[in-house]
Amino acid sequence: MSDITDQALDFTSSHDVPVPYMQRLRDYYLALGYGNPYRWAQYSQVPFTPLKRALRESRVALVTTAAPYKEGAGDQGPGAAYNAAAKFYQVYAASIDEDRFLGISHLGYHRGYTTAEDINSFFPLPALRQAANEERIGEVSPRYYGTPTNRSQATTIEQDCADLLRLLREDEVDVAVLVPN
């Protein structure tokens, strides 16, 4: 029998557990009147596709779920309350050279823990540029891409993924960095 205790192992208190958000979302969907709880996409097999060239020779794109500014949709800035009116419903692409507003007010996140004032926390384009400057990647794609978060797996798979793939192929992207918000 070992003399190792929870304290010696630096374990947290037994009541200090992660928020069971997945179960909470399942329960929430049932409370909204859906006939079944929300089901996350969870594949038993995920294909691995090796890179065709080294990362330092690859064109890398940034894909975000951040939303462009939507005229007339209310407060969308950092720290804004949840704003469903700011949602977007189609994949978009924009030049990495444009200085364009991107926000996350359309997403449900705990605003007590972040203000979303630092765009780099949800849209790390400067870090991607730095990786290119340091020759860790070949180059940054000329556009970044946005994809909606509207919780329909069918729409995501059948429409949004197809639209995003078309844009990535147009720009001859080798690698996409996905930044869900």
Image (cartoon, helix red, strand yellow):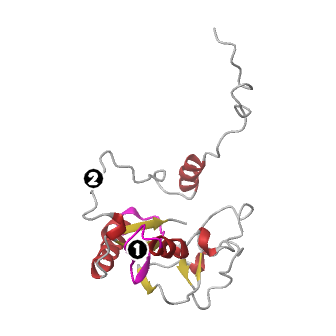
Relative horizontal placement of residue 170, taking residue 75 as reference (left or right): left
Mark 1 is surrounded, within 10 Å at the Cα level, by few (under 14), some (14 to 19) or many (20 or more) other residues, namely many
* Residue 171 in the image, given as x and y percentages of width and height: 31, 81
Residue at 27% across, 77% down: 169
User: Which disc, if any, is residue 61?
Assistant: 1
Tell me the amino acid under the disc marked 1: Ala
Tell me the amino acid under the disc marked 2: Pro
Do we see residue 25 in this rendering? yes
Q: Among all residues in the image, which is located at the extreme left?
A: 52
Residue at 75% across, 62% down: 112
As displayed, is residue 24 above or below residue 148? Answer: above
- Residue 132 within the magenta-colored segment of the rendering: no
Instruction: Kindly identify which residue carries mark 2.
Output: 47
Whether residues under marks 1 and 2 lie with C-beta atoms below 8 angstroms apart, the answer is no
Residue at 38% across, 68% down: 176
- Which of pointers 1 and 2 lies earlier in the amino acid sequence? 2
What kind of element bears circle 2?
Answer: loop
Relative horizontal placement of residue 82, taking residue 164 as reference (left or right): right
Which of 147 and 5 lies nearest the eye of the viewer?
5
What kind of element bears circle 1?
Answer: strand
Mark 2 is surrounded, within 10 Å at the Cα level, by few (under 14), some (14 to 19) or many (20 or more) other residues, namely few
Q: Tell me where the magenta segment starts and ends, as one range.
A: 134-155
Q: In which quarter of the image is residue 15?
A: top right
